[in-house]
């Protein structure tokens, strides 16, 4: 909650002003029943039409004043809560952007998304409702009760009892209902996720004829959503009827007790009307208060989830290191584990000079992507030293590292934007640079044939391009900023042999001095490398150049024979 106050503080004057206006409106609303009683008890018996008009007019003025005050204060409240939420969401987003990959893994992407959307919404609701009703509702309840107690204590007791019951009912029912609503929200999220997965994977689903199974999966999720929502609805169904019942019984009680008092000559008949309006006022305000409490408990829980991210300690600190000029890229006995259970990379050591090429080969899950993730400092090694540009990677900040690398990962996404923007990638590169990168990446040949060339729009996930075209755009993106180190993680998997050969030839020709890291399952793509790492189960099983590995590494030789039909000189 300290966070809530910290974010509200800059808007303090506005909030205070809104509170003062609400305060005024509540006082106006509390005067209305008094004037009503005055008309009935004094003006009507005296048949003083003038006084009735005057008092009635005054009541209208007060009612209008209260309405205007409430509208103004509500608008101010809406503005403040929108603004506070905007700032909170901005800070949360920028913290999410700066989370390390390890922290992202720990929080999970879907939870980060729901914190950015659902939770900020709940916090917004809390700020809004508290400002709108946080002063008005308690004031009306308290003012109404005090005025009633002063003039007829017996009626005060009736009102207090009914109010208390209403508050407790709403509080209990909503508290029980909220977990069901949270569950139904999750169930709806699942339905949305399945729809999204099916929409994007629609070709595969059709090709593999698994529509039936998908339909079943959807229907299960849909049924689940219906069931949880039904339960939530059932629990909440009790709330309004019970409070209506309490309101009606309260009205009856007020009239009965009032009538007894009038009979006994201790009260004027008109006052019953005044107390009835107080009662309605108090009852409504009580409902409002109970709802505000529920919003606060929901908002506070969400705020805690947001704080957890905003206050997550910075990891991946930058520490000083010595220089090691020969180590453009390298590792010294590096070990790493994602979950701390088993080692995903174990005892990795190699070194590479500037301008050399590193090849990485190994079966799926052997740690190839993990190895380059450590070079890029997406994760920090648990042990050992990772060298980048002659320095310990741990001594390089994110900006520093980002400028050195160009990288293509597997399953990377394209933007739903022009081809130019997909290659320039929000870096504002010149069209000449983009075209040069596209040429090196062997992408220009198909971009050129498109009617709108570089300005052709790419559909969501690049659905209007072939796999090979998408891959070449991603390679062009990695090349476009002329990086010193280029990392291609399985970037040739969708290219035919001729295009792949042309690609590597063009990179060697157009990017002199670039240090190249290529992960590929094709020996043809790796054979030029100065050093090839053969990975197996997170360990470097062997390393050397093409000739050395052919001579001594069985796995490598078998792959080479399989792929190149023995023509492996
Ligand atoms: P590949 O050689 O296919 O690129 P990876 O480096 O991606 O293999 O994965 C190596 C191992 O690490 C695998 O066992 C994989 O399951 C695991 N792994 C990869 N990424 C993560 C992650 N974010 N969280 C937990 N485990 C991971
Ligand atoms: Mg991989």
Image (cartoon, grey):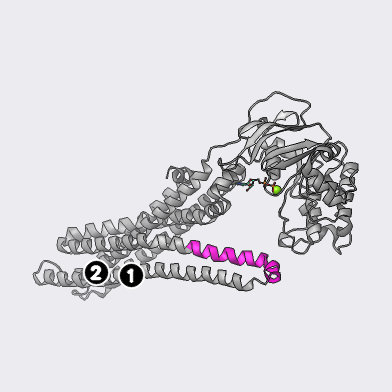
Q: Which quarter shows the N terminus?
A: top left
Where residue 432 sits in the image (x, y, percent)?
87, 48
Q: Nearer the viewer, residue 238 or 149?
A: 238
Name the residue furthest top: 322
Corner quadrant of residue 140? bottom left
Where residue 531 sits in the image (x, y, percent)?
81, 36
Q: Nearer the viewer, residue 10 or 415?
A: 415
In this image, 544 relative to 401: left or right? Answer: right
Q: Which quarter shows the C terminus?
A: top right
Where residue 2 sits in the image (x, y, percent)?
43, 42
What is the secondary structure assignment of the residue under circle 1? loop
Judge whether 351 appears above or below 443 on screen: above
Q: Which mark is residue 80?
A: none
Residue bounds of the magenta highlight:
185-208
Residue located 37% across and 67% down the image: 236
In this image, 372 relative to 304: left or right? Answer: right
Judge whether 131 appears above or below 274 on screen: above
Residue 207 is a magenta residue: yes
Corner quadrant of residue 70? bottom left
Q: Mark 1 points at which residue?
A: 238
Q: Is the magenta stretch mostly helix, strand or loop?
A: helix
Q: Mark 2 points at which residue?
A: 276
**Cα–Cα gap, marks 1 and 2:** 25 Å
């Amino acid at each position: 909650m300290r966070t809530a106050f910290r974010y509200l503080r800059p808007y303090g004057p506005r909030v205070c002003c809104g509170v003062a206006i609400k305060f005024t409106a509540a006082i106006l609303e509390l005067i209305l029943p008094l004037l009503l009683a005055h008309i009935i008890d004094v003006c009507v018996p005296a048949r003083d039409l003038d006084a009735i008009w005057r008092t009635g007019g005054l009541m209208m003025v007060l009612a209008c004043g209260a309405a205007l005050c409430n509208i103004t204060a509500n608008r101010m409240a809406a503005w403040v809560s929108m603004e506070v939420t905007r700032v909170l969401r901005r800070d949360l987003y920028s913290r999410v952007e700066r989370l390390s990959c390890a922290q992202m893994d720990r929080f999970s992407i879907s939870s980060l998304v729901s914190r950015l959307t659902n939770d900020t919404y709940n916090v917004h609701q809390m700020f809004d409702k508290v400002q709108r009703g946080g002063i008005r509702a308690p004031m009306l309840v308290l003012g109404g009760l005090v005025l009633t107690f002063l003039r007829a204590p017996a009626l005060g007791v009736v009102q207090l009892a009914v109010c208390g019951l209403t508050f407790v009912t709403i509080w209990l029912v909503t508290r029980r209902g909220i977990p069901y609503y949270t569950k139904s929200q999750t169930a709806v999220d699942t339905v949305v996720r399945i729809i999204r997965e099916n929409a994007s994977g629609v070709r595969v689903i059709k090709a593999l004829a698994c529509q039936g199974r998908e339909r079943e999966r959807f229907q299960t999720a849909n049924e689940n959503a219906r069931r949880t929502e039904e339960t939530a609805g059932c629990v909440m169904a009790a709330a309004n009827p019970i409070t209506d019942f309490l309101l009606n019984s309260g009205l009856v009680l007020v009239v009965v007790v009032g009538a007894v008092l009038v009979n006994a000559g201790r009260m004027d008949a008109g006052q019953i009307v005044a107390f009835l309006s107080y009662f309605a006022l108090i009852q409504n305000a009580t409902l409002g208060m109970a709802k505000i409490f529920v919003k606060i408990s929901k908002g506070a829980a969400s705020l805690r989830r947001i704080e957890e991210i905003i206050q997550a300690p910075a990891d991946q600190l930058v520490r000083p290191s010595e220089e090691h000029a020969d180590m453009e890229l390298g590792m010294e006995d590096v070990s790493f584990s994602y979950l701390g259970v088993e080692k995903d990379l174990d005892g990795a050591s190699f070194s590479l000079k500037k301008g050399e090429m590193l090849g990485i080969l190994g079966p799926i899950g052997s740690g190839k992507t993990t190895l380059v993730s450590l070079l890029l400092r997406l994760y920090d090694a648990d042990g050992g030293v990772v060298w980048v540009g002659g320095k310990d990677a741990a001594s390089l900040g994110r900006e520093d590292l980002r400028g050195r690398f160009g990288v293509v990962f597997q399953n990377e996404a394209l933007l739903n934007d022009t081809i130019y923007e997909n290659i320039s990638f929000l870096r504002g590169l010149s069209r000449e640079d983009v075209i040069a990168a596209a040429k090196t990446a062997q992408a220009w040949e198909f971009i050129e044939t498109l009617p709108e060339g570089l300005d052709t729009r790419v559909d969501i996930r690049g659905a209007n391009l072939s796999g090979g075209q998408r891959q070449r755009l991603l390679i062009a993106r990695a090349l476009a900023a002329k990086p010193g180190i280029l990392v291609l993680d399985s970037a040739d998997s969708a290219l035919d042999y001729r295009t792949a050969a042309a690609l590597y030839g063009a990179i060697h020709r157009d990017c002199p001095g670039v240090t190249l890291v290529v992960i590929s399952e094709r020996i043809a793509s790796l054979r030029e490398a100065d050093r090839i790492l053969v990975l197996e189960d997170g360990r470097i099983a062997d390393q050397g150049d093409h000739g050395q590995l052919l001579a001594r590494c069985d796995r490598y030789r078998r792959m080479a024979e399989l792929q190149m039909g023995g023509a492996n000189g």
